[in-house]
Amino acid sequence: MRDRDRKQHFRHGGGKPPEKRRETGRRPAWRGREAAADGPVILYGWHTVVAALANPQRHILKLMLTENAARRLADENIPTRVTPEMVRPAVIDQRLGPDAVHQGLLAEAEPLPSPDIDSLPQQGIVLVLDQITDPHNVGAIMRSAAAFAVKAIVTTARHSPEATGVLAKSASGALELVPLVTVQNLARALTEMNDQGFMTVGLDSKGNENLGEMALRQPLALVLGAEGKGLRQLTRDTCSGLARLDMPGEIKSLNVSNAAVLALYIGSFRLGLMS
């Protein structure tokens, strides 16, 4: 299963049952833009499904609700947009697996289209993910990206997690808010971004500058590598600069999703984007 989508004219989401296998984080792969028609996106959980229902660009195909979830939607005046199928929680459990915290909501929807690399806004911050494969990490990064009003996330069409319910649940609605651009060749995409005027900064423990002291400018692209491996050599070579995150404690490295939120805070503060 492969796909992608976005908010307004960019957005992205995806998935495929059974959810239990995705929870393990195994078999990461993405979707090329042309593969969006493979099948419906599976979304579950309160924030994830409510965000999808609120997105006019998201075409909801099917909505399964428990009695409690339906009552809560009605109490909060949230329109379902489609006639829901009322089910017992066990029905959704069977669909997703017993470990999925669905809160009584499951939606099947069409994926939203992915924007092209040349449509990136020329202001603010963009995140670039270099083969980050864990759906929980990518979902957490997307949630932080939405919180910091990131303009887009760029990732590869391969060696990235599918936008399944696991990623969507971790993103807590951010799939509907953050543009997600999938590219076939990350180095080529970074070269194009450099040509468009982006300052592309790779985060690397061996970077010759501290991000907090680096002279940053807009549009800024912060490039994050996979846990353990970090940035690939070609990615490092293509970035216009490399920066490190200096930590005062004994542990000098962070989980990639934590590194992302710290880098976003520093970048937003240095660029005067914090309100």
Image (tube, rainbow, N blue to C red):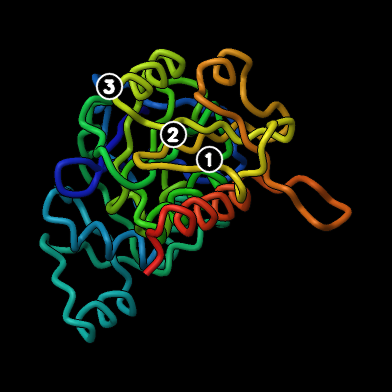
Looking at the image, tell me whether mark 2 or mark 1 is earlier in sequence order: 1
Kind of residue sitting beneath label 2: Glu
- Identify the residue position indicated by label 3 in the image: 35
From what the image shows, is residue 146 above or below residue 25? below
Kind of residue sitting beneath label 3: Ala
Q: State which quarter of the image contains the C terminus.
A: bottom left
What is the distance, in whole Å, between disc 2 and disc 1 at their CAs? 9 Å
Q: Residue at x 17, y 51 (%)?
A: 60
Q: Helix, strand or loop at disc 3?
A: helix
Give the label, 2 or 1, closer to the camera. Answer: 2
Q: How many marks?
A: 3
The quadrant holding residue 111 is top left
Q: Residue at x 33, y 38 (%)?
A: 180
- Identify the residue position indicated by label 1 in the image: 22
What is the distance, in whole Å, between disc 3 and disc 2 at their CAs? 12 Å
Q: State which quarter of the image contains the N terminus.
A: top left
The quadrant holding residue 183 is top left
Kind of residue sitting beneath label 1: Arg
Residue 213 position, x and y percent, is 61, 48
Q: Helix, strand or loop at disc 2?
A: loop
- Identify the residue position indicated by label 2 in the image: 162
Residue 74 position, x and y percent, is 19, 81
Q: Residue at x 56, y 35 (%)?
A: 224
Res 169 seen here:
no
